[in-house]
Amino acid sequence: MSCVKYVDPTIGNVGDEDSDYSHGGGKTHPGACLPGGCVQLCADTVTGGDNGTGYNYCQSTIEGFSFNRMSGIGWYGDLGNLQIMPVTGKTDLRSGTNEFFSLKKGTEGWKSPFTHEKETATAGYYGVHLDRYNVDVRATVTPHCGVLDLSYHETDDAKVIFNFSRRIGGRVDNSIVKIIDGTHLEGVIECSPKGGGFGHGHGRIEYKLWFCCELSESFRTAEFFSDEEYIGFNNEVEGADIGLVLGFENAEKVTIKTSVSYVDIEGARKNFAEVDGKTFDEIHAKAIETWEKALSCITIDTDNETDKILFYTCLYHTLLDPRICADTDGRYKAPDGTVKTDTDYIQRTVFSGWDVYRSEFPLLTLISPETVNDEVNSLISIAEARNGSFPRWELLGINSDCMVGDPGIIVIADAYIKGIRNYDVNKAYAISKAGSLGSETLFGKPFNCLRKRCDFLNEKGFKPELLSVTLEELLSNFTLAEFAKALGKNDDAEFFYETAKKYPVNYNPETGFMGPRYEDGSFMPLDEFEYDTDGCVESNIYQQSWFVPYDIEGLAELFGRERFIDLLEKFFEKADFSALWNGDYNHSNEPCHNLSHYFNYMGMPKRTQYWTRRVQKEAYRLGAFGFCGNEDVGQLSAWYVLSALGLAQVCPSIPVYEINSPLVKKASLKLDRKYHPCAVADTFTVECDKDPLKYPYIKEIYLNSVRLDGTSVTYDEITNGGKLFFVMEV
């Protein structure tokens, strides 16, 4: 079975929609990508607003095509460099849709209208027709290269505009561009927080992107421009606001191959070998082959075509990140500016930690443990370079400090406990412990701690006025305790267990919910459960109060068991699963993920099965508006994939997956003998005796023919291989 044909990269392509209400959408893009690939090549419809990929389905013009971007992110985005636009005739020297470079001297810019009817997106491929210029554009990629195939029709004035100043969420600081000869150019694009970028500069992202371009046709004319004025031709031009217009004589087709590197120009030159001498069709065929291999890690059997498309599209998004940031020779740029070489792993980037520890990494430990091992090594390398904590939300080695908590510890503890250990374990543990204690030094040097006032949290069980921070960091402490216990560090384990157990001090008996406390211990008054108030981050008190995944039984006792169950049921009953935001269960944001599985802990598995199915069917749909909210770098997708298999890991570092009704009749996961025991088989199969869409409740479960009494399976039971068999009923 071909898995690629079920991938629809257009699902979730809505960004910051221009309408009467703000719809954040999935914020994915339809561009050409590979699993974990450095290059994501796509059309740019906009530069501005909270359109982090540079593409928004709701817009009707294209300003160019750029080679790097993130997927499923907010906070205004970053990257989007080296924008290329095919044009004909005379045009303005601004795109006309870039809010950071407004059009001053022209009239409409070089942007072109397009229609979605003349747009094609598949795994590893993107194509579109530019109506204004009557040009067809095709795009495909390798891990470090992108290829644009431009077909001009009925013109003898084919041109290509290179926009070196463009950056999603801002502008570049400087570019240096060299014309090597009639078909080659290369250069470097420099970006820092001064120019904006992630969080409009608050993310503190700084990087250089080197590139090498090869054109299939020699240019006839070449003119650089700056500030909407031509500045003539030079072999080398430098500036913050520069572009280049190349003209071609009687060209019907121009193919542009481009390699990139975040290390140096030599890296870009070496990376070019991925496309050197290959045709567009050959490169595209390899991209399809790569995706087929990656997606075949899970094969499914269901008669529901929509579910197949959603499943493989979600799996596709899950596999995009964390992505390669090292060159083909293994070199990468460390945060301190030094160049290092990875020898035993691949250095990766884009770690949306607060999001992805909940479902994406629990899924990756099953289907791609090598990626998890790479990411652990990457986090250690980044922390070591700055002698500090693991980054919270990392891009190109920089901790953007987006969101809260200490997710690096969570991911590493979970990986170690699951036997993913090809890294310096002692160093990983030392960094984790120092970060949780707020240590001033580590390895004989000053330590840059991510967390503040650790002593206060560890002693009191809360951080003043910060409920989300408190509960997230207590979870990190719990996972560190599990990590310490697995290493035989019993004193450390006892200490961090004790800190995690202090979560009840955050329960306000007057309101019956968790609540933020002032430094003197008194509870803050609540703002009527409003979103992003009351010490909550991207949540409200109602949503955040459930967040003690390591002690759900204890939390139920704290609330009162009957009240806990009643509140949980109403939490789901009142929710609109398809909406962008809910004051109740809010699937569009992470604090609510996996809460439907709390019913299992209350001895009510059929409620887990009912509500999980409702979320699957109502929060995920086909089309650009298909995701109920921000896709969050694979997390929203990974939740769907795991739940479709009937699984959810509720608490990281506890290697247990709670069971819900599978969405598909049968699914098989390929296991990895390098990391998984495979004691029974090298595949793990989930199978239902009847169609689970018609028979949605579980009557009995058998693991390798032995009846299960509970509602969960362990990580070891899954990775030993074999079959989990469900007897379904109405």
Image (cartoon, rainbow, N blue to C red):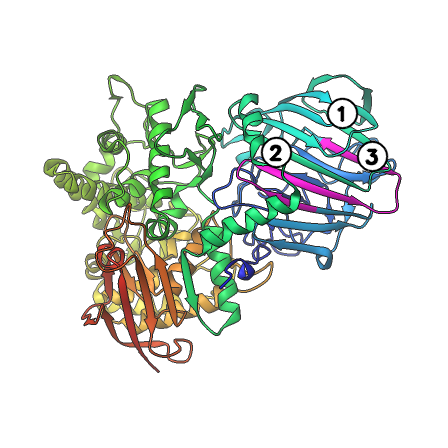
- Is residue 92 among the parts visible in the rendering? yes
Q: Residue furthest front?
A: 277
Q: Are marks 2 and 1 in contact (CB under 8 Å)?
A: no
Nearer to us of marks 3 and 2 is 2
Q: Quadrant of the C terminus?
A: bottom left
Nearer to us of marks 1 and 3 is 1
Q: Earlier in the sequence, mark 3 or mark 2?
A: 3
Q: Residue furthest bottom?
A: 730
Question: Which one is in front, 582 or 371?
Answer: 371
Q: Earlier in the sequence, mark 1 or mark 3?
A: 3
Q: Is residue 593 magenta?
A: no
Q: How many marks?
A: 3
Task: Tell me the crowding category of disc 2: few under 14, some 14 to 19, or many 20 or more residues within 10 angstroms, Cα based.
Answer: few
- Mark 3 is on which residue type? Asp
Please tell me the numbered disc located at residue 404.
none
Left or right: where 127 falls relative to 520? right
| Residue tagged 2 | 276
Question: Which one is in front, 517 or 20?
Answer: 20
Tell me where residue 288 appears, x and y as whole percent: 55, 51
Q: In whole angstroms, how far apart are the C-alphas of marks 1 and 3?
A: 24 Å
- Mark 1 is on which residue type? Gly
Residue drawn at point x = 27 percent, y = 54 percent: 549
| Residue tagged 1 | 182
